[in-house]
Amino acid sequence: MDKFVIEGKRKLSGSVTIQTSKNAVLPILAASLLPQKGETTINRVPYLADVDTILKVLERLGAKVKTYPGGNLSLSPSERKVVISAGHLKSYEAPYDLVRKMRASFLVMGPLLARLGKAKVSLPGGCVLGPRPVNLHLTGFAKLGAKIEEEHGYVIAYADKLSGNTIFFDRPSHTGTENILMAACLAKGKTIIVNAACDPEVVDLALFLNRMGAKIKGAGNSTIYVDGVKNLNAVEYTPIPDRLDAATFMMAACATCGNVEINNIVPEHLNMVSIKLREMGAEVKEHKSSLRVKGPKKLKPVSVTTYPHPGFPTDVQASIMALATIADGTSQIKETVFEDRFTHVMELCRLGADVRVSGDRATINGVPRLKGASVMASDIRAGAALTIAGLAAEGTTEVLRVYHIDRGYDQIEKRLARLGAQIKRVKS
């Protein structure tokens, strides 16, 4: 139960390199189950608790997993890689003790159904963000010809052979789109996914699958077309940079009136974040694979509505709220993606913030200053927001339960410290 101890009011300056996208790496690692022979190599794999969980799930299923360098992912980010051989899977069950830790573990269901014709996966856990049912996944699998049962907290699916079909999502589902996409690659015939998620990570998964020999068109649009193939091949691939990691450092620069160059990014993935930070008075200059953020002396209030991509990301909502707490005026935030995604509000208030929540809306009255206190992370992005608030606060802030932050951020405290933050990890 480590914690971060932060001495606030230090301007951040310098440059930081953004990690590879967690939300791209996890489905890509799950998709490495699809080839029947060969070694799939994934480069620049971030050192995250969630990555460790999905690799353990793959090993439990019988895949051979090798990590480099020397099996220690905490070394040399540009050189890290994972090599997976899934030719001889020995199990079709992803157990509760692993899947409960992370919702993305459910992504192995699509590849298992496609490869083995059966899958038994525990109902998933992960961050507590209100109801996030997997019914969209299951409805899609049923449309592809799978028989679905639920038993003792597990979802069991069977299919002699998946067959292509048209699948309509009631609303865009990031992991639902990815799960169906992986299953459809080896299904017989054509699959059309309507109202698909358009996130960059979905596009990256489609590019990876196409590199393996899949036939996918339309990824990044609301309708995706998949022509099933008989086999997929093991390949080497480098996933996209993490837009959420980048957004967190952009917010940290603004919170501290800092001046930070953010490298290894795709600027268009951050369009909505850049727009809102400019509205708050920040200077954001974009380059080919980097951007520079300079925070204003006093932030302006902002109005934000979260929405599926290309809208403002729900995963950045907590961080921009942390900025709004010290803005000069009243900000409004509406959360339309997840219920119960305001768990960070009470913790921000412990730092002196003035935030009122009514249903899916939060009203934030900016205060002259935040003051350090002990606060507790309730999920990955809430933990990042509290870290940002601690950087802006006067005095000492303790952020407890940073294991949540470790699920999504690769040694964030070390990268912040290199920018001038007074932050350290303390063992409890």
Image (cartoon, rainbow, N blue to C red):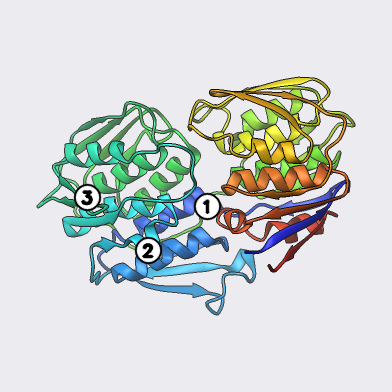
Q: Secondary structure at mark 2?
A: helix
Picture coordinates of residue 266, whole percent (x, y): 61, 42
- The reply to whether residue 246 is visible in this rendering is yes
The reply to whether dot 3 and dot 1 touch (C-beta < 8 Å) is no
Picture coordinates of residue 60, whole percent (x, y): 33, 70
Mark 1, Cα crowd under 10 Å, few <14 / some 14-19 / many 20+, is: many
Picture coordinates of residue 277, whole percent (x, y): 73, 29
The mark lying in front, picked from 2 and 3, is: 2
* Residue situated furthest left in the rendering: 160
**Quadrant of residue 285 in the image?**
top right
Compared with 293, 114 (above or below) is below
Closer to us: 164 or 46: 46
The mark lying in front, picked from 1 and 2, is: 2
The reply to whether dot 2 and dot 3 touch (C-beta < 8 Å) is no
Instruction: Compare marks 3 and 1 and give the one earlier in the sequence.
Output: 1
Q: CA distance from mark 1 to mark 2?
A: 21 Å
Give the position of the C terminus as an image quadrant: bottom right
Closer to us: 384 or 222: 384
For badge 3, the amino acid type reads: Leu
**Which residue corresponds to mark 2?**
97
Picture coordinates of residue 76, whole percent (x, y): 64, 69
**Quadrant of residue 122 in the image?**
bottom left
Rendered image: mark on residue 52: none
**Quadrant of residue 407 in the image?**
bottom right
**Which residue corresponds to mark 3?**
186
The residue depicted at 41 percent of the width and 38 percent of the height is 174
**Which residue corresponds to mark 1?**
22
- The reply to whether residue 286 is visible in this rendering is no
